[in-house]
């Protein structure tokens, strides 16, 4: 070993474009909720970087926001907030 502690090494090279995806019920204002959380953690994100896709039956929405990720900590904090919100069923 060369003395570098790789236990906290990230496989991601920062900064980079990174898609953040969250899913929730279509009737729960999920797009606005995801945007509010993501833009708080990545304030330079543009609304043109948001994609919304309905599920086959239209009951759920998948919201993907592509951000410029600056650090693992930024991503961890963003995902923690997304996952803790009652309207968000899953965050990837």
Image: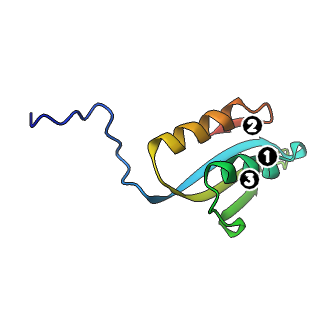
Q: Position of residue 67 (x, y in %)?
A: 57, 58
Q: Where is residue 60 in the image (x, y as percent from the top left)?
A: 80, 45
Q: How far apart are marks 1 and 3 (CA)?
A: 5 Å
Q: In which quarter of the image is residue 45?
A: bottom right
Nearest to the eye among marks 2 and 3: give it: 3
Give the image location of residue 51, x and y in percent: 70, 61
> From the viewer's perspective, is residue 17 above or below residue 31?
below
Question: Residue drawn at (45%, 43%), measured in percent from left and top?
Answer: 72
Closer to the eye: label 2 or 1 = 1
Q: Name the residue under label 3.
A: 35
Tag 1 near tag 3, CB within 8 Å? yes
Q: Is mark 2 on a helix, strand or loop?
A: strand
In the displayed image of the protein, which residue is found farthest to the left? 1
Looking at the image, is mark 2 or mark 3 earlier in the sequence?
A: 3
- Which of the marked residues, 2 or 1, is nearer the chain's N terminus? 1
As drawn, the label of residue 88 is 2
């Amino acid at each position: 070993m060369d003395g570098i502690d790789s236990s906290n090494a990230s496989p991601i090279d920062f900064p980079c474009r990174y898609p953040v995806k969250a899913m929730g019920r279509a009737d729960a204002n999920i797009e606005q909720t995801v945007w509010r959380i993501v833009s708080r953690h990545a304030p330079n994100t543009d609304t043109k970087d948001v994609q919304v896709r309905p599920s086959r039956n239209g009951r759920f929405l998948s919201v993907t926001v592509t951000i410029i990720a600056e650090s693992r900590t930024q991503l961890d904090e963003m995902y923690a907030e997304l996952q803790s919100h009652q309207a968000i069923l899953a965050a990837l």
